[in-house]
Image: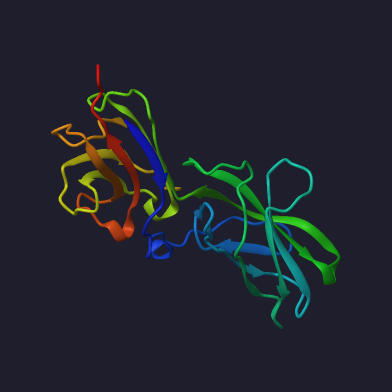
Amino acid sequence: MSYRTFAVGLAAAAALLAAVPAGASAAVSATLSKACYSNIPTRGSEPIVATLTGGTPGGRFQLNTVAPNRPGGSLGFVSGNFDAAGNAVAQITSWRLPTFTINPSKGQTVVLTVSDYTAGALDVPVAQTRVTNVAMDVSSKPRSPRRKRKVAVSGSPFANQRLYGFIVKGTSRKVLRRISLGRANACGYVSSRQIVAPRSYRPGSYRLYVNAGRTLNKQRAIGSRFRITRRLL
């Protein structure tokens, strides 16, 4: 039994999380739009959106994402100007996880810092958030399709929702088995041991889709393609 993981769908990913405020310090403060942001490996990242207040009116700034407790090095940044009231909305559209991985992640912490160049303040921490991947990983062991294996999923569109898996034949929409993976955390992460095979266990090509809710929705799902083969003695 072999698996190959890939990401699909998620057209409405950005709309699935409520706005979550973040704490701040120093003269400039920041409020973030989400509690966790997602990267789709090889495809790009969801913008980290920060509303900044308390900056130098009309002054130049840079907003950085950095790994906590690590010297220097930005994981992503954007520059801009405060308005006449010292406010700004900044979006970091390209960033990376502190510890590189393309696998599902429970969420890695990043710190947001602001350099208010006009005021001479450099890299002042103003908030922190978590980042993750939109990803699925299905263990290739055990080899028998009749035994449970680890299934892990993450992605901020799934945050705090109950996730279900759906096994279908090829591109069919007919669900051959539905499994409950449990409730995801704030970064959409959940891990569970499940039988990932149709109830018939017949050889063939199948797909496991995972989305929030008890009904298969391929446009809001991620999926993993696998095959069941007959062993010849």
- For the question of whether residue 1 can be seen, the reply is yes
Horizontal side of residue 200 vs 137, given as left or right = left
Residue visible at 25% across and 28% down in the picture: 145
Q: Is residue 29 or residue 155 the one in the foreground?
A: 155
| Residue 116 in picture, x, y percent from top left | 78, 67
Quadrant of the image occupied by residue 48 = bottom right
User: In which quadrant is the N terminus drawn?
Assistant: top left
| Residue 28 in picture, x, y percent from top left | 71, 64
Residue visible at 20% across and 49% down in the picture: 214
Q: Is residue 168 or residue 233 the one in the foreground?
A: 233
| Residue 32 in picture, x, y percent from top left | 56, 61
**Residue extending furthest toward the top:** 233
Q: Is residue 200 or residue 23 the one in the foreground?
A: 200
- In the rendered view, would you say 175 is above or below 18? above
| Residue 202 in picture, x, y percent from top left | 17, 33
Residue visible at 32% across and 39% down in the picture: 226
**Residue extending furthest toward the front:** 232
- For the question of whether residue 185 can be seen, the reply is no
